[in-house]
Amino acid sequence: MPGIDFRFAWSNEPVWFVIVSNILVFGAYIFIFIVFKENAYASTVIQVENEQHVITTGPYTIIRHPMYLGMVIMSLFMPLALGSYFSLIPMLFVIPITVFRIKNEEEILLKDLKGYKDYCSKTPYRLIPLIW
């Protein structure tokens, strides 16, 4: 969609906005890298591994799902980094899909991961600090 948007000049983003968006996408990528470095259990599959323990360090001290925060930021700013306002419309679906996934993941973690309930009481925010 960004290519079509560019071809027909639908969006007219200022260059500074594209640059800021690219910086935010890169920052989100680095943040996700830090999350994976902090949590060796991070995976696309929702399951509890043998010997897995609750990670409470690094970004996990602030929110319970920092990888998803990085992914949402990256997903929302990628269309803007490519210079396309219209490409942002389908990417907005990332938010409800991520919320649904977090809720499902937390059900499994509360049931199967020892200490996760205590961690939830100490770290109340799931995705966005001070909000949710």
Image (cartoon, helix red, strand yellow):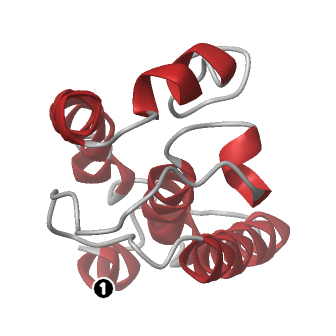
Q: Is residue 42 above or below residue 119?
A: below
The percent coordinates of residue 92 (x first, y second) are 32, 41
Q: Nearer the viewer, residue 96 or 1?
A: 96
Q: Nearer the viewer, residue 65 or 38?
A: 38
- Residue at 85 percent across and 70 percent down: it is 16
The percent coordinates of residue 49 (x first, y second) are 23, 67
Which residue appears farthest toward the right when viewing the image?
Answer: 16
Q: Is residue 86 above or below residue 130?
A: below
- Residue 102 appears in which quarter of the rendering? top left
Q: What amino acid does circle 1 point to?
A: Gly
Q: Is residue 10 above or below residue 64?
A: below
| Relative to 75, 128 lies left or right | right
- Residue 48 appears in which quarter of the rendering? bottom left
- Secondary structure under tag 1 reads helix
- Residue at 24 percent across and 79 percent down: it is 4
Q: Nearer the viewer, residue 102 or 50?
A: 50
Quadrant housing the N terminus? bottom left
Q: Which residue is mark 1?
A: 3
- Residue at 42 percent across and 61 percent down: it is 75
For the image, the number of numbered tags is 1
Disc 1 crowd rating (10 Å Cα; few below 14, some 14-19, many 20+) is few
The percent coordinates of residue 65 (x first, y second) are 49, 45
| Relative to 119, 71 lies left or right | left
- Residue at 63 percent across and 37 percent down: it is 63
Quadrant housing the C terminus? top right
The percent coordinates of residue 122 (x first, y second) are 67, 20
